[in-house]
Amino acid sequence: MLGLMAGLGFGQTSSQDWADEVLYFVIVDRFADGDLSNNIKVDLDGKGAFHGGDLRGLTQKLPYLSELGITALWITPLVKNIDDYTDAIGFPDWAYHGYWADDFTRLDPRFGTESDLRELIEKAHQRGIKVLLDVVYNHAGYGSHYIQDPATKAWLRYGSACGEDDLTSCIAGLPDFRTEDAQVRDYLINAQLHWAKSFDLDGFRLDTVKHVDHPFWSENRKRLREELQRPFFLVGEVWGGSYQVCDPWFERDEMDAGFDFTFAGNVISFVQGRGRTIAFSRYLQKRHQIRAGYQMAHYLSSHDVPGAFYQLKGDKKRFQMCVALQLSTLGIPVIYYGEEVARIGGDWPDNRSDMPWGDNQTLPGKALPQDTDMFDFYRHWIALRKAHPALMVGTYRELSTDGDVLVFERQDPESGERVWVAANRSGLETTVMVPAQDGISALEDGLNGDRPSLTETGWSLTLAPLQVRVFVTERKP
Ligand SMILES: [Ca+2]
Ligand SMILES: [Ca+2]
């Protein structure tokens, strides 16, 4: 791998390596509590309180994640966070999410020890699961030691020093690092490089990307490459990001991928019958115009937005359509913890509720039910995606946009494999005719093995109400 990277030049391979990943995003505190001894001021009834989840709990749940089929984990920041809460929003809100750092040079004991982190990464790798650590360069937590310490307080903008633009404003009133200052920049990059060097992490998820200047991101990339000498993936949160919005960071090769803020809204509208079928098809097609070698990570829910299942008011069939389309679309699908067992979520802070563990006694979500049928649905679609690279990286070709049925073809540029995806958003069983295509002699449903027939007018595809099907094609013998 290293030799290949040297030969191709940087920026050519690390992103491609992630084209076949399925990423699972965990808020460590809300997932699984594997060590009661590190629980400090845990309050399971407090929506903004620590709930006790930690690295050891996450490690214990790796078999569950393997069964689901995910191939990479994104975990919330682990560095020491502030010990106080804010009640500006009407209830005590603590740093359980990890985004309010107090000290970038050590781990927060509430999430675990360095040996816990080492064990998580080692055991994840044994299962073929990569680990991305979330890092924040833009700001520190409220009242953090960085603004108390005379040696560092000039490093930040806070109070009346906060600016008005993206780079210098204090997001949610958080002290903003002067990342344009070389001393501050070097401190922050050194601190995060330490974690990348000391642990076998596979990359970083970069927080608040558009609030930090481009020279900082270029330096970050350069230092990581020079000092790690191994593939190290960077996926960045550019708020509101699409492939176009993220392109300035791709153009400068400051990150490999960005989060796609456009997918969820578009797919939810489509399954709700809003907008024309062809509009959704053209949206999907356009996503393929992304700069070569870079990727978008598309999600249905996150810690910052109300999730798709909640927006669809718990409509399971329509949510499953979103899932099936997410898993048959270009990019890196991101599953937000618990979606796969129908955690309903809600508006903030309910979108950060505990992972439901059914009746298996895992804290903090031990009493919350799991929808195992939803889990199986995810498992099958993830397996289908992994079995057919066309679904991950294939080109897009529209086959039918009649009425409420969308049919498109994905073709793997490497193997030539062609796979069809058909989605019926109507509440009625619908049959659509797709004209015969050169080079295709038979179709087979990738999940149940059904083989549609070729009539004089074309392929007759019948879809149940609110169903998505994938057809694997066969060539003429
Ligand atoms: Ca704990
Ligand atoms: Ca900033």
Image (cartoon, helix red, strand yellow):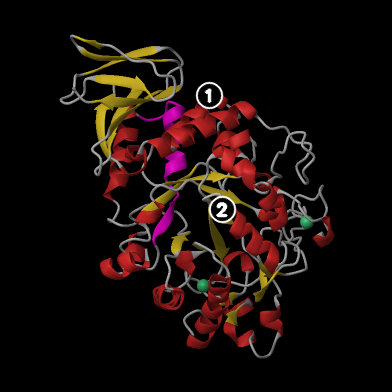
Q: Residue furthest left?
A: 438
* Residue assigned mark 1: 317
User: Residue 216: x percent and y percent?
Assistant: 44, 76
Specify which label sits upstream in the sequence, 1 or 2.
Answer: 2
On the rendering, which quadrant does ligand 1 occupy?
Answer: bottom right
Q: Residue at x 28, y 26 (%)?
A: 473
Q: Residue furthest top?
A: 456
Residue 332 vertical position relative to residue 359 in the rendered view, above or below: below
Queried whether the magenta region covers residue 260, the answer comes back as yes
Q: Residue at x 28, y 11 (%)?
A: 453
Queried whether the magenta region covers residue 437, the answer comes back as no
Few, some or many C-alpha atoms within 10 Å of disc 1 (few <14, some 14-19, many ≥20)?
Answer: some
Determine contact: label 1, label 2, CB under 8 Å: no
Q: Quadrant of residue 316?
A: top right
Residue 263 visible in the snapshot: yes
User: Residue 39: x percent and y percent?
Assistant: 82, 59
* Residue assigned mark 2: 126
Q: Residue at x 71, y 83 (%)?
A: 148
User: Residue 237: x percent and y percent?
Assistant: 48, 59
Q: Is mark 1 within 8 Å of ligand 1?
A: no
Q: Disc 1 and disc 2: Cα gap in Å?
A: 35 Å
Where does the N terminus fall, quadrant-wise? bottom left
Q: Which residues are magenta?
A: 256-275
Secondary structure, mark 1, is helix
Q: Is residue 105 left or right of residue 277?
A: right
